[in-house]
Amino acid sequence: MEKRIASGISIILHPFFIPSFVMLALLNLNVFMAFVIPLSIRLWIQGMIFVLTFAMPTVMIFFLHRAKIISSFYMENRSDRFYPLIMTGVFWGMAYYLLSRTGLPVLYYEFLLGGLAAIIVATVVNHFWKISIHMLGMGGLTGVFLGMSFRLGMDIFPLIAASILFSGLAGYSRIKLNSHSPSQVYTGYGVGAFLMVIVYLLPLI
């Protein structure tokens, strides 16, 4: 029963969902007059993020599995992660480029740079160690809200606290499923949060 719960948590908090969670939060915070953006534009942005950071990577992983390039759709083995990470990075880069052409303030899509940095780190580290990509994503989620809070002086403690709580659940699920060791979970979370905070604070330096 506990493993089924852990599996459910792991699916709900999959890294592919994180960009959609972040964009949903940003478009509903009073950030650079977000509420004056027409609803149709907000829906287009949300849909584009979902397609490029969830739907397309998921479809590509499905085809990689069908073509036997990776042995498991869930990528339990380090050897299965290289091509999915590269393809995910390409789609994130496309999302960043498209959003940069919309005229939106960079604050709305800066998190994609932090995500790309995390993907690069994961790709390099994956050659010798199985860092938790789930926790890289959850750390990035916390890092976005911390970075926004520091940079804009916003009080978004509820979002920060919620991201930490959900990160704890994600970490529990990965350890419970024997997908990662505690050190791989903690390192993933720390690296993800650090990279995202740096991306948001660099303009202040």
Image: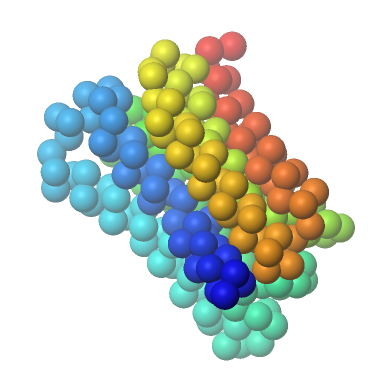
Specify the color scheme.
Answer: rainbow
Residue 149 visible to an observer of this rendering:
yes
Q: Where does the C terminus fall, quadrant-wise?
A: top right
Residue 86 visible to an observer of this rendering:
no
Tell which of 156 and 65 is nearer to you. 156
Residue located at (66% from left, 72% from top): 75
Tell which of 168 and 156 is nearer to you. 168
Residue located at (29% from left, 50% from top): 46
Residue located at (13% from left, 39% from top): 38
Horizontally, is 168 left or right of 100 in the view?
A: right
When asked about the image quadrant of residue 4, the answer is bottom right
Q: Position of residue 138 (x, y in %)?
A: 56, 46
Q: Position of residue 130 (x, y in %)?
A: 78, 59
Image height check: is 64 above or below 202? Answer: below
Horizontally, is 196 left or right of 159 in the view?
A: right
Q: Position of residue 34 (x, y in %)?
A: 23, 30
Q: Position of residue 39 (x, y in %)?
A: 14, 43
